[in-house]
Amino acid sequence: MGLKVYNTISGKKEDFQPVSEGKVKLYACGVTVYDYCHIGHARSAIVFDTLYRYLMTKGYDVTYVRNFTDIDDKIINRSAEEKISWREVGEKYIHSFYEDMDALHILKPTHEPRATEHIDEMIALVETLLRKGHAYQAGGDVYFSIENFKGYGQLSKRPLDEMIAGARVEIDDRKKNPLDFVLWKSSKPDEPSWDAPFGSGRPGWHIECSAMSTKFLGNPFDIHGGGKDLIFPHHENERAQTEAATGTTFVKYWMHNGFVNIEKEKMSKSIGNTLQIRDFLREYHPEVLRLFFLSTHYRSPVDYNEKSIEDTNSALHRLYYTVERAFEMIKTKDVNPLPYSDADVLEKEFYEAMDDDCNTALALAHVFELSKMINKMADEGGDSSIPHIAYLNNLFLSLTQQLGLLNDDLNVFESQEKMRHLTREGLQLSSLEEAILERTEARKNKNYQKADEIRKMLLEKGIILLDSQKGTDWRVKNISAAKGER
RNA sequence: GGCGGCAUCGCCAAGUGGUAAGGCAACGGUCUGCAAAACCGUUAUCUCCGGUUCAAAUCCGGAUGCCGCCUCCA
């Protein structure tokens, strides 16, 4: 079974057939660099990162392009607010973008072009459009004329007359048609501008993606992605201007991810409920966010709320503990992994799920089943099952890592989680260790009452003590349960 | 007003014709001095009404509710 993807323009799942055999050209709209990234950006990045990884797993030679919009009104405004140049604004937020993406283990795309480094290509594109009669000049600006581009509205599926009738389209006298959009805009005296045959100024929003995707991927290319909100007007306009200029299909498959809501409310700056990635990471492990997003199909809206995140956090712990347990059993011996057919079935189902329009939620279900299989085998014990456990564990890690999960070393994961928790509780590691020692003494003396008091005291701080032959270790209590008690 | 989407166990969430994956939580059990983790077991007929079909959560029609887009936005 081959990969199927849902194509926005046809509204259907289609068999994925790349333009060139064995190669995939993928373009995802990146960010406008004027602020820190929020978890909506993270979702988009994670969705297309997952697709990118999966395409590579399937053996495609993938060229993945993700742009930076580094010139735009918001950047100019920001530059005034922060009293730094617009270029410094760009640099600053590109830097922060990388910090966030690295923390989330988002793989680096093949190319990450910046708009301002491709002004020449944009100018050439605008000139072509002018020459072909798809664009016109008005008051120093250049507009794209939708009139003689017959496919306008196909992507977003909007009838033109009704869009025009829509109350929210701003009427601009300079436009021949209210839906015409700017390709090039004249700059005010103190704004950045570039010389062009049709007057100095700066590019409109959509033109950069047309220029850069075409430059790096050619036309047509395979997949163009982004958030659902980009379908109109951004992608509709990109498509119109590119196809009008080149006379050929722009993109074969359009893929769009759903939104992130926060507590059932749309996340937006005007409501003031945006959650930045860096703020999230102060509270939770980065993979909690990844697992959370992968638990819902990428096209569906997803509601961010504390309970769901804490549930996800518990689920992620389960995955890590499974690996920990498996390694514990394997490490003592030199083990040759021995295949196990029940696991091979799960592996097959995992790939079938991924092939079905990247159904990561279903794929994850199989990962959890595999986790159960490993734990069960470990429970039943017996040296004879160890080669199987080694096999299952290898498979488990290969599947989770395809989803970008379980990147951390177990010790790192655990200790980060513990430190994060101690900070949250305002506890010192040394005093915790002291309490544990004290309890161990009490247990030796069979003073279980005191031992239980200490256990209870620590439990109230979200710390669980784990007794074993080797001594007493501790873990962070499942946070959702801990919070419910307080 | 136009276009589109969604409604599945307490919560989250897969599932597009053959009698409901998975996660979290809960309860009972095994294990443990007590716990934890893990494992075993238990918990749904899919918003409502009508239709098509041998057969529908899945297709069609209608109702109700929720949401998104049409303006910068991942």
Image: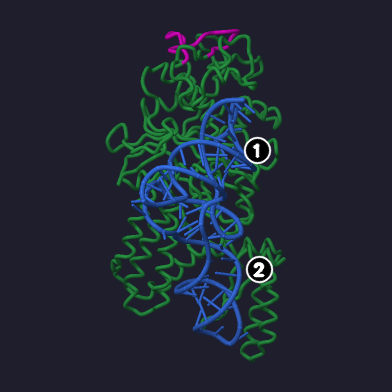
Instruction: State yes or no: discs 1 and 2 in contact (Cβ < 8 Å).
Output: no
As drawn, A266 above or below A121: below
Residue A316 shown in magenta: no
Quarter of the image where the C terminus of chain A is located: bottom right
Which image quadrant for residue A443?
A: bottom right
Residue A460 % position (x, y): 70, 71
Q: Position of residue B38 (x, y in %)?
A: 48, 71
What separation in Å lies between label 1 and label 2 (alpha carbons)? 33 Å
Q: Chain of mark 2?
A: A
- Give, as a single range, the part of the protein colored magenta: A126-143
Kindly indicate the quadrant of the structure image that contains residue A340. bottom left
Could you say whether the residue bearing mark 1 is in a helix, strand or loop?
loop
Dot 2 amino acid type: Gly
Can residue A316 be seen here? The reply is no
- Give left or right: position of A349 versus B40: left
**Labels 1 and 2: the sequence-earlier one:** 1
Tell me what residue is drawn at x 63 percent, y 13 percent: A172
Q: Chain of mark 1?
A: A
What color does chain B have in the rendering? blue
Which residue in the structure is indicated by mark 1?
A: A268
